[in-house]
Amino acid sequence: MTAPQVQMFGLKKSAATRAAERFFKERRVKVHFVDLGVKPIARGELTRFIQKFGLNALLDLEGKAYERSNLAYLRTTEEGIIARIVETPELLRLPLVRGGKVLTVGEDPEGWARMLEG
């Protein structure tokens, strides 16, 4: 049996990202961490999360980055919003985590636990 591993997209300064890292570390799960502050999320990865949750579910509507972006007032296409997300990962509810076929958005310990059920 292979050791469980997950892929996590987040920001080092995000409390929820750190919580997820801690969750998996405590359970000895290998984490492939992609720091969105260093490397933008790949469009294909982002699309996978959008297909499952819808674009609005991924946006941190309460966050300062969302407020500053004026996205609430702009008339833009989904494509335009995706381009913004790639430039400004703080617009996302982080972390985005993928373990096997399970995807989670934001702080979601129940979802993370489901990833480990295998």
Image: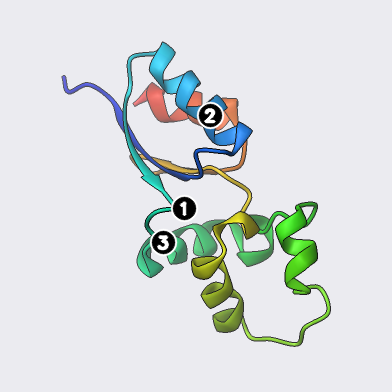
Distance between the alpha carbons at the discs numbered 1 and 3: 7 Å
Q: Is residue 79 left or right of residue 39?
A: right
| 101 vs 54: above or below | above
The nearer-to-camera label among 1 and 2 is 1
On screen, 8 above or below 83?
Answer: above
Q: Nearer the viewer, residue 86 or 100?
A: 86
Q: How is the image coloured?
A: rainbow
Q: CA distance from mark 3 to mark 2?
A: 18 Å
Query: Residue 117: which disc?
Result: none
Mark 3 packing: few (<14 Cα in 10 Å), some, or many (20+)? some
Q: Residue 18: give its label.
A: 2
Q: Position of residue 13 (x, y in %)?
A: 56, 38
Q: Of the residues shown, which amino acid type is indicated by label 2?
A: Arg
Residue drawn at 59 percent across, 82 percent down: 80
Task: Give the amino acid at mark 1.
Answer: Gly
- Three-letter code for the amino acid on which mark 3 is drawn: Pro
Label 3: state its secondary structure. Answer: loop
Question: How far apart are labels 1 and 2 at the CA level?
Answer: 14 Å
**Is there a contact, CB below 8 Å, between mark 1 and mark 2?**
no
Give the residue at mark 3.
40
Foreground disc of the pair 1, 3: 1
Q: Specify the label residue 37 is tagged with.
A: 1
